[in-house]
Each structure stands twice: as structure tokens, then as C-alpha cells.
Image: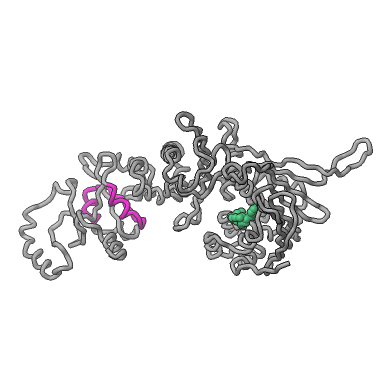
């Protein structure tokens, strides 16, 4: 037997899991079942695509076996399995940077932290919330030897050769005090239904069932095996057969979120391409939304067979908060990430999916404004990124995004701003380049106030870059107030002779400021302040100039 130590991060994680994350210990079962389901997906995929595995008899199933007397539970699958190397790599280290990130985000607040655990899928190690000893016996598909991994979740683990009849993995939990409540068949069935009902493979529970024997007038125990999940690809069923609870349960099982989703959009497309999509909008933005290494939440299936998750090709990056499923009839099963990038079928599905999501959001904005504001509170900013990257849907995105403005409290839409335009007004105006309070008191707004023109307050850090590329909303010009060219809307009261009288002053200012300015001009845009700095329309604005300089331009 060989003894190994856990990677430092694993020990750290185990400490946390065992000592501070007790609020939902039941998720251990969801995590272990989802690992089994992943392992079955992987093997099924091989049997369909890899010649070496094509002849393999594949009987996909997950078996839970409860021993109430000894307080143990085994979770066995007929999946891809692990060899010695895999066991060491997967159950002794943390490879994914996402999880390392998770560790750094922990706050010590148990409730918040266990939410994080769900999102990052800390996975296998959650077994140690309920067990003081865990044993894993696994045999990798295509290999003869099996291996046993055992650990008390404290310092390290042991590995030794073992036996297993077929490929797959068996995890045995020796329940601790916290885990004893799960040495109960009712409780187990409840937890499986709650989190794993729609796992695509059958989950069986074997236990000693008490049944009343009428003849003997006493209760008897019989060793029973029952299927405990629905095991259907729920998204392939017609909408009218599905309840709200079905949708919410599926969401929780695929996303690891505890909360109900805000909305979902279920679409079956038939015609030149056949596919089903089911998209969910989480109530809260995923924690890694603004991290370069974010995980996407849409899974790709081909004919109900799981192909891959975290494929960044499935939706544009500004919709990375969307969770759900794309199930295609037309893609090949052995589609790879590389192929996906230029696959015509996927490109069509993706284009249609984006249109669908945006148009559904538009409906919600029109018909459920309060719900829509909840959406905006989380996702206004990613939508703005779309203005920059998704030219084809720019008009729709402009209608979906909400804005702060000088005329209303809270948020407003461009359609509303447009409806408030004054008789004869030519353009819509916005100001960027700082915090809201700074923008609201900017001298640049004086003339607009005086003329009663509405100005949008764009105080998001990306606003300046994004909106400098958006010239129009419909046929109306969108103009930044800090660009030099004065708009027609302001010009009616211009006094050209003023420039003449002010010329000596302007020349003197220019001489004093020298190269620090390009030009000193008389302006109609100020009402009360004596002067302000603006940038040339053709030139990048101040903030852009700073950013370009920082990038070495
Ligand atoms: P994740 O599932 O997010 O990768 P886990 O901690 O749940 O993280 O599991 C770590 C890894 O261990 C998995 O990625 C997988 O490679 C391996 N693993 C865990 N359980 C099984 C299993 N039942 N069969 C095969 N491999 C498994
Ligand atoms: Mg897992």
C-alpha cells in the first residue's frame, strides 16, 4: 500500500468543507452522482466515437446501496473509471484554477460559502462533510487492473491494487455523525429527487425495505432495488407536459444553483435544422462573470447524448451568464472543440439562439417590467459588451439596455428617452468618463439643463469604449457631450460675434497653455461655468487616450 499526501490546496479545502460548510451537507450526494453521470457520459461518448471502445457492452447505470446497520452508502457507476494515475491526479490535487479561485473568495460566512461550493462544484471532496472515511474502488475502461483509494480526509490517502469486475467506480462512504441522517432510504430518495431527478441515467437504490406481512402480522425487511430518478431528457418533452417545478429542478441539477432561475426559454426547432434549446437566466450573476477564466453554463448534447460543457463556442461571450442545454440532431457525435468553431450547423444554432434569447428578453421587458429590472440589476453590463461585439443584434441590445439619465430617477430605456425628445430635437446625448455623481454635476451638462435636453449618464467603466462605437439609435444620432462638435440642437442661440470680441482672451489663453491644448475656443455649451475641457470629435476621448497610452499606443 502506498501513502500519499494531499496537495496543500486540497488540505485547505477539506478543512473548510469539514469545519465551516455545514449548512447543506446533502449536496454530497448531488456531487457524487454528477461525477458518476459525467463518467457515464464520457464512456458512452467513447463507445460511439472510438473504434477501440465500439464493441464494449455498455450498461449505463448508477447504483446506490445503503447499509443502515453499518451506516455506509456506496455509489457505484459503470462509467469510464480511473486508473492509479487518474486517482492521484483527480482525488489528490486541485487542477482547476476555478477552485483555487474559490478558495480565495471564501468569506467565512457559512451560508454564502456553501453557495460558492455549489457554483464551483468542489465536488468529490464534499463527501467528507458526511463521512469520516471514504473508499474509492475504480477500474478504467479498457484496463484490467483496479485500484483502491482510501482516505480519512485529513492528511492524505492510500492507494493499492484492487479488484473490480467491470469498468467503473464505486465510492463507499462511512458516515460520520453529521452523515448519519443519510443512512435512511427515505432521506436518500428525497435528496436524489431534489437534485438528480433528471440525470440522464437510471439511479437505483438498494436497501432493506420494511413491509407489513399481513399473514404473519408483522413487519419484514426485504432487500429491494428500486429506480429513484425519472432519468428522462426532460428538455426533449413537449412544453405542455412540463411543469414549472420540472423546469426549476432541471435548472438546479445542471447549474448547481440553489435559487430558482429568473426566466427560462424552451425552444424546439424543426426544419432545415432540428434541435432543442433550453436556456435559463440565473437569478444572480455567476461569481466568475467578470473573470477571464469564466466557465460557461451551456451543455451541448447530440441526440440526447452529452458531448461537452464549458464550450465557449455555443453562445457569444456577452451571454456567458446563460445556463442550459443545446441538443442537436444534426451534429456528429464525435464533434470536437476545434470543429465546433467553424461548424455551419452550430453557427446557425448559435445565431438563432442569440436571437431567441434577446427577443424573449424583449418580451419580458414589455410584459413583466418588474421582473425585467431584476434581470437588468445583474446583467446590464454584459449586454453592453454585446454592443461592442455583436453588431448584428445592436439595435435589439440598445432596446434591452437600461440607462441612468438626467430626467428620470432609476433607469430608463432608449425608447422612453426617444419618446421624451423635444419638438425638433435632432440627437440623443450622453456623458461618460467618471462616477455618477461627478457626471451629474459636470459643467458640460449646463447648456443641456438650460435647454431642457435629456442626457444619459453612462458611468460604467466600459461605457466610453462601447458607446463611442454606437453612432445611432434607429435613425437618431447618439452623441457624447464631451466631444467638441456642438450639435444642431445647441446651435440656435450661438452668437458668432462673441468669438470676435473674445479673440484676444482666447489667444492669450492659448499662448499660456501652449502645447497642453490643441485649441482654445469660445463655446455655447456653458451656462454658468467659465470654461471646460473637451476632446476633438475625431480624437479618442480622454479616458480612451489614457487607456491607449497604458497599452503602449
Ligand atoms: P469535477 O467533477 O468538477 O471535475 P470533482 O471533485 O467532483 O470535480 O471530481 C474530480 C475529478 O475526479 C473528476 O473531474 C473526474 O475526473 C474524477 N472522478 C470523480 N468521480 C469519478 C467517477 N465516479 N468516475 C470517474 N472519474 C471520477
Ligand atoms: Mg464533480
- Image quadrant, ligand 2: bottom right
Q: Residue furthest top?
A: 271
Give the magenta range. 444-470
Residue shown at 31% from the left, 54% from the top: 465
**Does the rendering let one see residue 373?**
no
Would you say 174 lies left or right of 453 here?
A: right
Residue 2 x %, y %: 71, 68
Residue 312 x %, y %: 46, 49
Q: Residue 533 occupies which quadrant of the picture?
A: bottom left
**Is residue 478 rendered magenta in the image?**
no
**Does the rendering let one see residue 76?**
yes
**Is residue 452 rendered magenta in the image?**
yes
Would you say 96 lies left or right of 535 here?
A: right
Q: Report the quarter where the C terminus lies.
A: bottom left
Residue 544 x %, y %: 28, 59
Residue shown at 66% from the left, 45% from the top: 194
Q: Nearer the viewer, residue 286 or 429?
A: 286
Q: Residue 542 occupies which quadrant of the picture?
A: bottom left
Residue shown at 56% from the left, 32% from the top: 239
Residue shown at 60% from the left, 31% from the top: 241
Would you say 72 lies left or right of 363 here?
A: right
Residue 169 x %, y %: 69, 52
Amino acid at each position: 500500500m502506498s501513502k500519499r499526501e494531499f496537495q496543500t490546496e486540497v488540505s485547505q479545502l477539506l478543512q473548510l468543507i469539514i469545519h465551516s460548510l455545514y449548512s447543506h451537507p446533502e449536496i454530497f450526494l448531488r456531487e457524487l452522482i454528477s461525477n458518476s453521470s459525467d463518467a457515464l457520459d464520457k464512456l458512452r461518448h467513447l463507445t460511439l466515437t472510438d473504434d477501440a471502445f465500439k464493441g464494449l457492452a455498455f450498461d449505463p447505470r448508477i447504483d446506490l446501496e445503503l447499509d443502515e446497520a453499518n451506516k455506509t452508502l456506496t455509489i457505484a457507476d459503470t462509467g469510464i473509471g480511473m486508473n492509479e494515475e487518474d486517482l492521484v491526479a483527480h482525488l489528490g490535487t486541485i487542477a482547476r484554477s476555478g477552485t483555487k479561485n474559490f478558495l480565495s473568495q471564501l468569506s467565512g460566512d457559512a451560508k454564502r460559502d456553501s453557495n460558492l461550493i455549489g457554483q464551483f462544484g468542489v465536488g468529490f471532496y464534499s463527501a467528507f462533510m458526511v463521512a469520516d472515511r471514504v473508499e474509492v474502488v475504480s477500474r478504467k475502461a479498457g484496463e484490467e487492473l483496479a485500484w483502491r483509494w482510501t482516505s480519512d480526509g485529513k492528511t492524505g490517502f492510500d492507494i493499492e491494487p484492487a479488484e473490480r469486475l467491470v469498468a467503473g467506480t464505486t465510492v463507499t462512504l462511512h458516515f460520520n455523525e453529521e452523515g448519519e441522517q443519510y443512512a435512511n432510504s427515505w432521506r436518500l430518495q428525497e435528496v436524489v429527487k431534489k437534485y438528480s431527478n433528471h440525470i440522464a441515467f437510471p439511479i437505483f437504490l438498494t436497501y432493506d425495505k420494511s413491509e407489513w406481512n399481513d399473514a404473519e402480522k408483522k413487519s419484514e425487511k426485504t432487500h429491494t432495488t428500486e429506480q429513484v430518478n425519472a432519468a428522462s431528457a426532460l428538455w426533449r418533452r413537449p412544453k405542455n407536459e412540463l411543469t414549472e417545478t420540472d423546469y426549476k429542478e432541471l435548472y438546479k441539477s445542471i447549474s448547481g444553483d440553489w435559487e430558482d432561475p429568473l426566466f427560462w426559454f424552451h425552444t424546439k426547432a424543426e426544419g432545415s435544422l432540428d434541435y432543442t434549446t433550453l436556456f435559463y437566466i440565473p437569478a444572480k450573476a455567476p461569481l466568475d462573470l467578470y473573470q477571464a477564466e469564466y466557465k460557461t453554463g451551456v451543455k451541448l448534447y447530440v441526440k440526447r447524448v452529452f458531448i461537452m460543457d464549458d464550450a465557449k463556442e455555443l453562445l457569444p461571450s456577452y451571454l456567458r451568464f446563460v445556463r442550459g442545454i443545446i441538443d442537436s440532431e444534426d451534429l456528429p457525435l464525435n464533434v470536437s472543440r476545434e470543429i465546433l468553431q467553424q461548424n455551419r450547423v452550430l453557427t446557425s444554432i448559435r445565431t438563432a439562439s442569440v436571437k431567441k434569447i434577446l427577443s424573449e428578453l424583449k418580451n419580458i421587458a414589455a410584459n413583466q417590467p418588474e421582473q425585467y429590472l431584476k434581470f437588468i440589476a445583474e446583467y446590464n453590463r454584459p449586454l453592453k459588451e454585446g454592443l461592442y461585439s455583436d453588431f448584428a443584434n445592436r439595435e435589439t441590445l440598445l432596446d434591452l439596455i437600461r440607462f441612468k439619465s438626467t430626467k428620470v430617477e432609476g433607469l430608463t430605456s432608449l425608447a422612453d428617452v426617444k419618446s421624451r425628445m423635444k419638438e425638433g430635437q435632432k440627437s440623443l446625448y450622453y456623458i461618460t468618463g467618471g462616477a455618477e455623481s461627478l457626471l451629474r454635476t459636470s459643467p458640460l451638462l449646463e447648456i443641456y439643463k438650460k435647454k431642457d435636453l435629456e442626457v444619459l449618464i453612462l458611468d460604467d467603466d466600459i461605457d466610453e469604449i462601447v458607446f463611442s462605437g454606437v453612432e445611432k439609435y434607429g435613425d437618431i444620432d447618439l452623441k457624447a457631450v464631451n466631444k467638441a462638435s456642438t450639435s444642431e440642437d445647441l446651435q440656435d442661440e450661438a452668437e458668432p460675434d462673441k468669438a470676435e470680441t473674445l479673440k484676444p482672451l482666447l489667444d492669450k489663453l492659448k499662448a499660456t497653455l501652449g502645447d497642453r491644448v490643441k485649441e482654445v475656443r469660445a463655446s455655447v455649451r456653458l451656462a454658468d461655468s467659465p470654461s471646460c475641457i473637451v476632446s476633438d470629435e475625431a480624437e479618442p476621448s480622454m479616458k480612451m487616450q489614457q487607456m491607449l497610452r497604458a497599452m503602449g499606443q
